[in-house]
Amino acid sequence: MNTVLKQFRFRTAMMLAVATVFASPAPLSAQEIVSDWVEGHNVRTRLVIATLPKIAAQEASSAASVTPQIVAGLEMELSEGWKTYWRNPGDAGGVPPEFDWSGSENVAKVEVHYPAPMRMTDAAGSTIGYKKHVVFPVHVTPSKFGDAATLKLQLAFGVCNNICVPSEATYEVSLPAGKAPPVPAALAEALARVPAQGDPQPGHPHIEKIETALAANPPKVTMHVAFPNGTAGADVFVEGPPGEFVPMTRVKGKSGENTLVYEIDLSEGADVEALKGETLRVTIVSDKSSSETQLKLQ
């Protein structure tokens, strides 16, 4: 798992009951630093910046405290019935967000994270994304810690209801030198909902067994996925390498009390030969926790 996210979860565990990524955000305090709202078609967006506090050694499982980290969030409020997209928009298509941070100052690296998304199905098919309210967390590595930093973002994204509307907006927000604004509850919740990466962690959903039948008719991949904290809100999203399409999963049944069987029918638009030997990115979500792992298609 990303070290910053792991450290931050120690601070946010008790905040999960306070806010949810799809709920209305808590009011900002006077100390919090945000850009102006940018009004769009059935959506408004803004950029918030904050500082993660030093993490104590016993919390971070580290020999010493770590340097405070800068975090930001692209916050989006959508009108009732409207949606926006995850990094993979799903089978029915859509416009995933595109982030351009090239105008930022004292910024060496920017990494956008995606909180656990949801499947949205209508007459056009299934898409993956968010409704009502979402914050995309951003980890910022400054060129020089302690100096002022300015985030400048050019964002392109899509919002959809019965029609889809391409949208663009620009934002600027600055963190003065030595300033340590608090992390808003909505950003804290979004960070906590970023899927845990790497080896399975206690309580997080994980793949128990994988069965591949690439030469079958139809070719398919079957995954037995365990949800230790229950299957409420359970879903699995699979992404191929750049340029390769992977159909969305379907639930085929259960193989245990909290283990669901998901199947990918590769005959539904995938290039099986191109996918052989490739590594797929698997995101497993539920109401309680989420995780991200990889599997090699053999």
Image: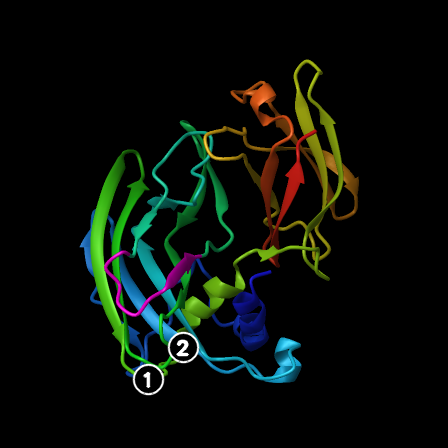
User: In the figure, 221 relative to 269: above or below?
Assistant: below
Q: Say which quarter of the image contains residue 220.
A: top right
**Crowd around label 1: few <14 · some 14–19 · many ≥20 (10 Å):** some
- What SS does tag 2 mark? strand
**Is residue 146 found left or right of 63 in the rendered image?**
left
**Crowd around label 2: few <14 · some 14–19 · many ≥20 (10 Å):** some
Q: Say which quarter of the image contains residue 288.
A: bottom right
Q: Residue furthest top?
A: 217
Question: Looking at the picture, how far across and down is residue 275, in whole percent?
Answer: 59, 26
Residue type indicated by callout 1: Lys
User: In the figure, 237 relative to 176: above or below?
Assistant: above
**Is residue 84 found left or right of 203 in the rendered image?**
left
Q: Residue at x 37, y 70 (%)?
A: 142
User: In the figure, 190 relative to 278: above or below?
Assistant: below
Question: Looking at the picture, how far across and down is residue 128, in whole percent?
Answer: 46, 41
Q: Residue furthest right?
A: 256
The answer to whether mark 2 and mark 1 are in CB contact below 8 A is yes
Please tell me whether the stretch drawn in magenta is mainly helix, strand or loop: loop
Question: Looking at the picture, how far across and down is residue 59, in whole percent?
Answer: 63, 80
Residue type indicated by callout 2: Thr
Q: Is 40 a magenta residue?
A: no
- What SS does tag 1 mark? loop
Q: Residue at x 73, y 55 (%)?
A: 228
Mark 1 or mark 2, which is nearer the start of the sequence? Answer: 2
Q: Confirm whether residue 80 shows in the render.
A: no
- Which circle marks residue 179 in the picture? 1
Write the start and end of the magenta stretch as one range: 102-112
- Which circle marks residue 51 in the picture? 2
**Is residue 7 found left or right of 92 in the rendered image?**
right
Q: Residue at x 71, y 55 (%)?
A: 200
How far apart are the alpha carbons under marks 2 and 1?
A: 8 Å
Question: Looking at the picture, how far across and down is residue 218, in whole percent?
Answer: 66, 16
